[in-house]
Image (spheres, rainbow, N blue to C red):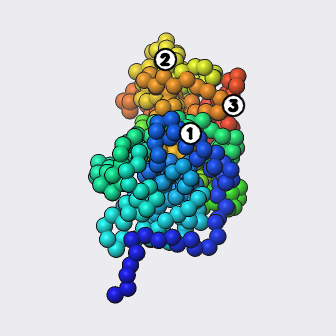
Amino acid sequence: MTARPEFYRFHNGEKAPLQFSASEYDARLKGLRARMAELGVEVAVFTSMHNIAYYSGFLFCAFGRPYGLVVTADQDVTISAGIDAGQPWRRCHGDNITYTDWQRDNYWRAILSVTGEGRVVGYEADHLTLLQKSKLDAFLKPSKSVDIAGTTMVQRMHKSAAELELIRKCCAVADVGGYAIKDAVKVGTREIDVAMAGRDAMEMEIARVFPDAEYRDSWVWFQSGINTDGAHNPVTARQLERGDILSLNTFPMISSYYVALERTMFVGEVDPASLKIWEANVAAHEYGMSLLKPGVSCAEVTHKINDFLEERQLLQYRTFGYGHSFGILSHYYGREAGLELREDIDTVLEPGMVISMEPMLTIANDQPGAGGYREHDVLIITEDGNEDITHYPYGPEFNVVG
């Protein structure tokens, strides 16, 4: 019987163009290795989609299988499943090892081939399951395990010039989706039809602007009426009615980078009670954006917007924090939780950070002005303030449509 390997290198074809240059990934790895040295970590084993993508450019499709990235002082090696063949090699910076599924835990044997035994191993405590941590211990036999999730998150929060350029382009794509949605809104149209118009427009624009990319994961949430009460409510087949409140949400995904455009809209007309809430939320949005500047903490911004809404007797309708970091994150992977506009986050804003302002007020269905009101812009923190890179207009003058 032919011997079947536990792992092998299947470097099929040539390296594909990645979203960033090799020097960009080298700089990220250099920063990571400096952080590892500060913590006494000899080898890092990454298992999350966001960190593997950040340091290697490879965004995996798990489908129940584990993936990894191993970084040592002189190696960076992605670990991928045989089902993906040569695509992980072509789409990653550095080396790649393919593990086979002929026997259980070949994934860990492939990792061991890079790490060796008895090293000080860095891992992601916020991602690695108890089961996989036990296997890490059994196979790698670390002399010590160190959680490096926090320090890598801090590194990701500070964007490079190349990242900022990409994020600006992402926001322009989100705007394209917004205009397509505006044009698609008509009485009697279903939410799903409007959402598809926005998604299709973004995907066409992404393919135009990024001809060398892989295309995946862009989506739209378009909600109407009572469906606007939650920020993450799925699309339905509800038909739009005149006077409906709408929530426009476009989410282009480009090489694992995510941005968002979110706007309150109304079909045809807006009643006085709804207009009052909408204008108040717009005012909170504008006030919040004015607060985003270097040297101010996330908690400080949050408390000031809280006071703004409390003065207008609206704070009780707030449903979540006022904004969060952008970069490598998604609704199913990644989250830079250290950069969110919430009362319990003391992170101080610094130039090069990217953060949203997105106040939301939700009024119950049995109250005047019922619905969810949300405006959302993406901003880059600069040396003396911020740069708003979302350009689709907000407010009643532009967004009573259909």
Q: Position of residue 304 (x, y in %)?
A: 52, 16
In what element is the residue under mark 1?
Answer: helix
Q: Which residue is mark 1?
A: 34
In the picture, the disc for residue 59 is none
Q: Residue at x 31, y 67 (%)?
A: 104
Residue, disc 3: 387
Q: CA distance from mark 3 to mark 2?
A: 22 Å
Q: Quadrant of the N terminus?
A: bottom left
* Inter-mark Cα distance, 1 to 2: 35 Å
Callout 3, which amino acid?
Glu
The quarter of the rendered structure image containing the C terminus is top right
Apparent side of residue 135 relative to residue 81 in the rendered image (left or right): left
Mark closer to the observer (1, 3): 1
- Label 2 is placed on what type of residue? His
Would residue 191 be visible to someone looking at this image? no
235 and 72: which is toward the camera: 72
Residue 216's spot in the image, x, y percent? 55, 59
Indicate which disc residue 303 carries.
2
Q: Measured along the vertical axis of the image, is residue 8 above or below residue 263?
A: below
- Say what amino acid the circle numbered 1 marks: Ala
Q: CA distance from mark 1 to mark 3?
A: 30 Å
Front residue (pair 203, 254): 254
In terms of secondary structure, where does tag 3 sit? strand
Residue 213, image x and y in percent? 64, 60
Which residue occupies 37% across, 50% down?
A: 118
First reached walking from the N terminus: tag 3 or tag 2: 2
Q: In the rendered structure, which disc, 1 or 3, sits on the residue that comes first in sequence?
A: 1
Q: Residues within 10 Å of mark 1 (few under 14, many from 20)?
A: some
